[in-house]
Image (spheres, rainbow, N blue to C red):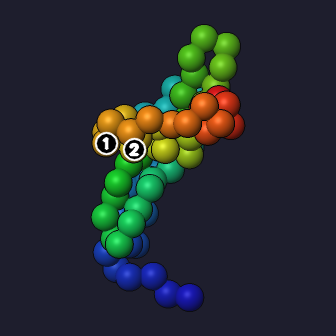
């Protein structure tokens, strides 16, 4: 499977984004639709809890668009 040059360029930004993570394992995730970046997330920590980059990206997307997560999804994502 080949990916477009545009998508390749978008994905090439992930290591740079991951460097912003303060944890030892630096990961980044992007939500992409139709070649457009909707949201980015990095591994983070809040008190004693760590948050995966994927969860961070999903939560940011919801916050950007003023969407509410149902209680079921809030439970699953924490």
Residue in the picture at 50% in, 87% down: 2
Residue in the picture at 60% in, 11% down: 47
Who is closer to the viewer here, 16 or 75? 75
Residue 55 can be seen, yes or no: yes
Label 1 element class: loop
Residue 25 can be seen, yes or no: no
Who is closer to the viewer here, 67 or 5? 67
The image position of residue 38, as x and y in percent, is 35, 54
State the mark number for residue 37.
Answer: none
The image position of residue 11, as x and y in percent, is 42, 63
Rounded to the nearest whole Å, what is the CA distance between mark 2 and mark 1? 6 Å
Q: Is residue 22 above or below residue 13?
A: above
State the mark number for residue 65.
Answer: 1
Closer to the camera: disc 2 or disc 1?
1
Q: Residue furthest top?
A: 47
State the mark number for residue 61.
Answer: 2
């Amino acid at each position: 499977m080949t990916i477009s040059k545009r998508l390749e360029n978008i994905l090439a930004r992930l290591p740079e984004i991951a460097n912003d993570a303060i944890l030892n394992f630096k990961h980044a995730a992007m939500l992409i639709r139709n070649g457009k970046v909707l949201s980015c997330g990095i591994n983070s920590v809040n008190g004693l809890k760590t948050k995966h980059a994927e969860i961070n990206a999903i939560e940011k997307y919801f916050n950007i668009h003023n969407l509410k997560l149902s209680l079921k999804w809030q439970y699953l994502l924490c």
